[in-house]
Image (cartoon, helix red, strand yellow):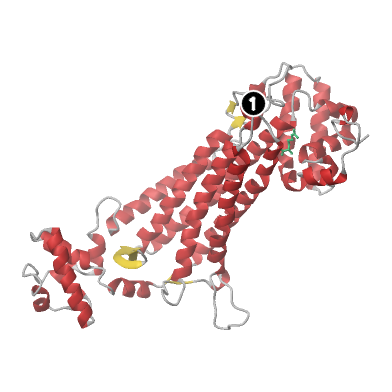
Amino acid sequence: MNGKPWDGRFGEATDRRVEAFTSSIRVDSRLYRYDIQGSVAHCRMLAHCGILSEKEAEALVDGLEKVRAEIERGELAYDDRLEDIHMHIEDRLRGLVGRVAAKLHTARSRNDQVALDVRLYLRDAVGDILKLVARVRTCFVDLAEKNIDVILPGYTHLQRAQPVLLAHHLLAYYEMFTRDAQRLREGLARIDVMPLGAAALAGTTYPIDREYTARLLGFSRVSRNSMDSVADRDFIVEFLAAASLCMVHLSRLSEELVLWSSREFGFIELPDAFATGSSIMPQKKNPDIPELIRGKAGAVFGHLTALLCTLKGLPLAYNRDMQEDKQPLFDAVDTLSACLGIVAAMLPALRFQQQRMRQAASEGYLNATDLADYLVEKGMPFREAHGCVGRAVAYALEKGCELDQLNLEELRAFSDLIEEDIYEALSLEQVVNRRNSTGGTSRENVVAAIQRAREELRTDNSETSGRKP
Ligand code: ARG
């Protein structure tokens, strides 16, 4: 009387406001491809196990392919009365193949169906995101290689601290995005579990073969507990956590690009094609891309929190609350993908202002630690050397010059351990290259790090592209 699958038990039609409120079609329609892929595998398994005849299964599979084509041509109209993508597809299938369509849902519930769809979707989405992360990582290695001799100040507390190679700074981001890739890849192992066959929550009475379905769909494992199968959204939370951290890294990068492109820093020139102007101030060139990335990060963290909150109070097994997992998931995938994509496009176009960076690294006593280290090498205990150099800095400040601009006589007033070779020790190149402890900024280290990163990217790329369907 209502056209609902549950009509049998109901005495009146669903209120239109309820249909509008409970419908998720506007969000979950994007799962259509995975829903059909899952249904096709389900049909084949049912035939394989003799639950459907081969002929019935073929009719269903044919019909499902037709529905897919219709959706892709934009011919399927969405209707809140049909609630979600699962019911839209089944309804259209009935229109196309008639009564046999009613057999598709044998040994299945929407509860395990939606869990399957989201896993299929996320497996693909993570694969795509991994490719984007690899592109961003490659950008950093390329930039590091291209700018291997550029020196800039390294900062702590946003105060100039010690000179570093620009390449070293860039490779710090390479490390962050490499961890992001690892996290996303590790999460795949827990996405890669086939839930179908849990049915509503308790399993099914039909003699199904879940391993068969899993093989058809390219899953490595089937879920082990039917209740957990329909209640588990951990894999989405893990993805959102990994996505959030990746957004943190993108946002920190963005903050540096905003700072560096300011007149105050002047370390980079944003390419015109990746900046925007002002509608009132003709001189302006604004870093809107990094600002938007920084701005969008918050929403992704919000999605992680939203899903955690949705799940925390839920009794086993499926609850309708879980329908609210998709909007945050989809938005996180879209936001992260868009940010990674634009960063991969923008990074190669950045122009670094080498002179400006070098100038900044030469001013502000960034070699003070090196003067102290020099004294320690000549036998002075470090704390004493620290005090001694502190006095030298105060003197130079007073005089308005750098440490290496003091003459030997002035320097020797602070310690007679200081000799002519001090000027060499305080030069920018020396200061950088002597930091050759493992992971330090010396040129030799950084060149080796670039080589290592190249090899890592090669293996990662062959793993990612070698993945199954
Ligand atoms: N649209 C639902 C979701 O996204 C599908 C599962 C519905 N199950 C149910 N028992 N109403 O979670």
**Quarter of the image where one finds residue 89:** top right
Relative to the observer, which residue lies in front, 229 or 350? 229
Position in image of residue 400 (x %, y %) = 23, 82
Depth check: give the residue in front, 267 or 400. 400
Which residue is depicted at the point 53% across and 34% down?
189
Whether residue 462 sits left or right of residue 419 in the image: it is: right
Mark 1 = which residue? 227
Identify the image quadrant of residue 285.
bottom right
* In this picture, residue 61 sits left or right of residue 323: right
Residue 150 in view of the camera? no
Label 1 Cα neighbours within 10 Å, binned few <14 / some 14-19 / many ≥20: many
Q: What is the three-letter code of the residue carrying label 1? A: Met
Secondary element at image label 1: helix
Res. 129 in view: yes
Horizontal arrangement in the rendering, residue 357 relative to residue 385 (left or right) = right
Relative vertical location of residue 82 with respect to residue 150 in this rendering, above or below: above
Ligand 1, seen in the image, is in the quarter at top right
Image point (26%, 62%), residue name? 432
| Residue 430 drawn at (x, y percent) | 22, 65
User: Which residue lies at the image location 61% right of the left edge and 82% below the top edge?
Assistant: 280
